[in-house]
Image: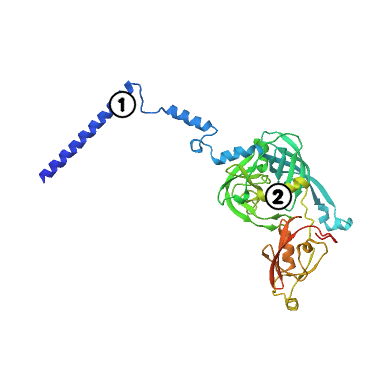
Amino acid sequence: MKKVSTLIFALALFLGMLTLSLKEMRNWQLSQGNETGLSTSIPVQAIAVSTAEFEQADNAPLEWSRETAITRGISDIAPAVVGISVTQIRYSQSPMMSDPFWRMMMPGDPRWIQDEVPTIGSGFIYDKKGYIITNAHVVENAKDITVTLEDGTQHNAALVGIDEKTDLALIKIRDVGTYPTVQLGNSDGIIMGEWVIALGNPFGLFSESRMPIATAGIISSLHMDFGFQQSGRVYQDMIQTDASINSGNSGGPLVNSHGEVVGINTFIFSGGNNTGSIGIGFALPINRAMDIIKELRSRGFIDRNYSTGIVYWNINDRIVQALNLGSTEGVLVANIKAGSPAIRAGVEVGDLIVGLGGERIQSRDDIFAYYIGQNLKTGDRLTLNILRMNERLDIPVVLDETEPGIVR
């Protein structure tokens, strides 16, 4: 046992001496380096200068800079975002008409009062000639429109076209010039959960800061359908985001981290009496919007003066048995107008329409609701899912006007 203790003591002594020797050798190397003018450390000032240079470099890697994909996306898009100020004409009924006495004393049509109401919104320039995309509810019934650019300059704008149904509008800066533009992205390629930025003019703060206000969030959901609204608008395939959207943000761009516009901020859900953001906002997909914008630019309106030319009948058990329809669901084609799109497509009297574009149909009300709910316009193709003599057919009908005596 005594021998083992002695051996352990000797080993510990040896290791201690070895450690001291290595330390002395290290100190000797450092002293030699100092004598020859060499240094083994980097001054703190040099590190600070190096980091600052990286932060200032336009092409610096993001990991060396305070910049992120979000900040670069904002800087790319901000020059083309505008604040919009509008004087709207609104009509309201005279307060006296709510009094039975005054209604009796002033019979006839209700008296209406015309008011000029200032409103605000947002938009973005997509064409260097000064064409701006925004929401219809921002500029509808506008007496005058003023846009504020990032540089603080203000310009009068003219209404080019408006489509209340899709809540889209196109305006143009009256002053001739070359203006900064956004880069349009692909809303069909949006990734659930990816970062997005909302830019615009919430509560009119654009005018105070002389720059668009930015908020960031993620894509919360996709393909949100709200159907036909009491206002007459139809919101379908909407993008949901938790990026803060408030009053005045309407019409502004929803931007991905590459600085590309993927949506148009349109409306929010608010809780209770709260009129501000609670993190549930919705944007129109840019791909769907551009189809409307292109037609607004070329024609100034969206042509929905179309028809199929079909007279529909709801069916019952007697009709099913009498006509041997083969199904108790669907709507019967009772008549077709001459020269109509349905005639040109090959639809026949007696066909049973069981679906529209793959969506199940059970009554005439379903058909009318489908027409109202879809963003259909003249020239669009509508697929009728038909049962004819127990045979399933899909017949495409190009929506157009009915022209009696003309067969194409």
Label 2 secondary element: helix
Disc 1 crowd, CA 10 A, few/some/many (<14, 14-19, 20+): few
Asked where in the image residue 375 lies, by quadrant, the reply is: bottom right
Q: Residue furthest left?
A: 2
Residue at 82%, 47% in the rendered image: 114
Relative image position of residue 111 (x, y in whole percent): 85, 52
Asked where in the image residue 234 lies, by quadrant, the reply is: bottom right
Relative image position of residue 262 (x, y in whole percent): 63, 47
Q: Amino acid at mark 1?
A: Leu
Q: Is residue 318 left or right of residue 10?
A: right
Q: Is residue 294 above or below residue 401?
A: above
Q: Is residue 265 above or below residue 75?
A: below
Q: Which residue carries the number 1 mark?
A: 30
Residue toward you, 345 or 157: 345
Label of residue 228 in the image:
none
How far separated are the C-alphas under marks 1 and 2?
A: 72 Å
